[in-house]
Amino acid sequence: QAGLTQPPSVSKDLRQTATLTCTGNSNNVGNEGAAWLLQHQGHPPKLLSYRNNKRPSGISERFSASRSGNTASLTITGLQPEDEADYYCSAWDSSLSAWVFGGGTKLTVL
Amino acid sequence: QVQVVQSATEVKKPGASVKVSCKTSGYTFTTYLMHWVRQAPGQGLEWMGIINPSDGGTGYAQKFQGRVTMTRDTSTNTVYMELGGLTSEDTAIYYCTRETGGFEDWGQGALVTVSS
């Protein structure tokens, strides 16, 4: 089934700002918005934001999400070494009646 | 606090079935939807389906229709995912996750290896 599109990799310097993107269509990101998850190697994913910019308890304000049309974005400010991980976006697709994920972006903090 | 604990690693032969469990605690089991997501080695996340613990209602990704069954046991606050007709392509970590608006609480994952 169709998924969301994420760049495979992004590299940024320590303490800089990274913006990750996730492109879908009007049936998913453009309709219901996107959620963002982070996954460190060997661990389950961790929810960072949902419904565009709601953060679960305990998630740093350095992570903020937004949406413009069919593209969702996750901005991470003040990059730290522990931010180095795989980042996934997800959204409900009303035409598929299914959740869809992006392929993931590997963020490297230099 | 919320806990989601999954069953252990399984090794299955092609053509067999596997049933993975996901035991929850720390909240009202019937209040939140549960999803199953899998991740093949070195790959991304793939949504498999959803179960409503309140009434047992399910919804499956088209890819798995006819091959997957999700159930729940309200007496033990446990959800189950059974996948049949296994092939090597089904080798993956299978996660259950509780939805609170997003996929907030995750099990530790259950590795299922399909090999002859």
Image (tube, coloured by chain):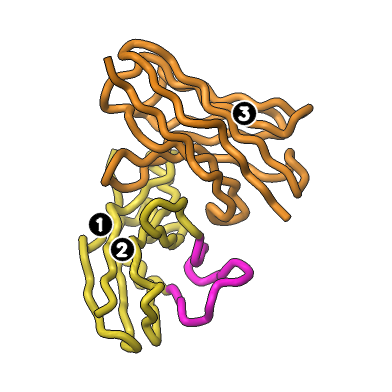
Chain colours: A yellow, B orange
Is A57 placed left or right of A65 in the picture? right
Residue displayed at 32% across by 29% down: B91
Q: Is residue B50 visible?
A: yes
User: Is disc 2 placed on a helix, strand or loop?
Assistant: strand
Q: CA distance from mark 1 to mark 3?
A: 30 Å
Q: Which mark is residue B57?
A: 3
Determine contact: label 1, label 2, CB under 8 Å.
Answer: yes
In the rendered view, tell whether residue B91 sits above or below residue B103: above
Name the amino acid, label 2: Cys
Any magenta on residue A51? yes
Determine contact: label 2, label 3, CB under 8 Å.
Answer: no
Q: CA distance from mark 1 to mark 2?
A: 5 Å
- Image label count: 3
- Which one is earlier in the sequence, the residue at label 1 or at label 2? 1
Q: CA distance from mark 2 to mark 3?
A: 30 Å
Q: Is residue A69 visible?
A: no
Residue displayed at 44% across by 21% down: B83
> Residues in magenta?
A47-65
Name the amino acid, label 1: Thr
Question: x%, y% of residue A32?
Answer: 46, 58
Is B94 placed left or right of B20 in the picture? left
Question: x%, y% of residue B36?
Answer: 49, 37
Q: Can you say which quadrant of the picture contains the C terminus of chain B?
A: top left
Any magenta on residue A53? yes
Residue that carries the numbered disc 1 in the rendered image: A5
Residue that carries the numbered disc 2 in the rendered image: A22
- Tag 2 and tag 3 share a subunit: no
Residue displayed at 39% across by 84% down: A77
Name the amino acid, label 3: Gly
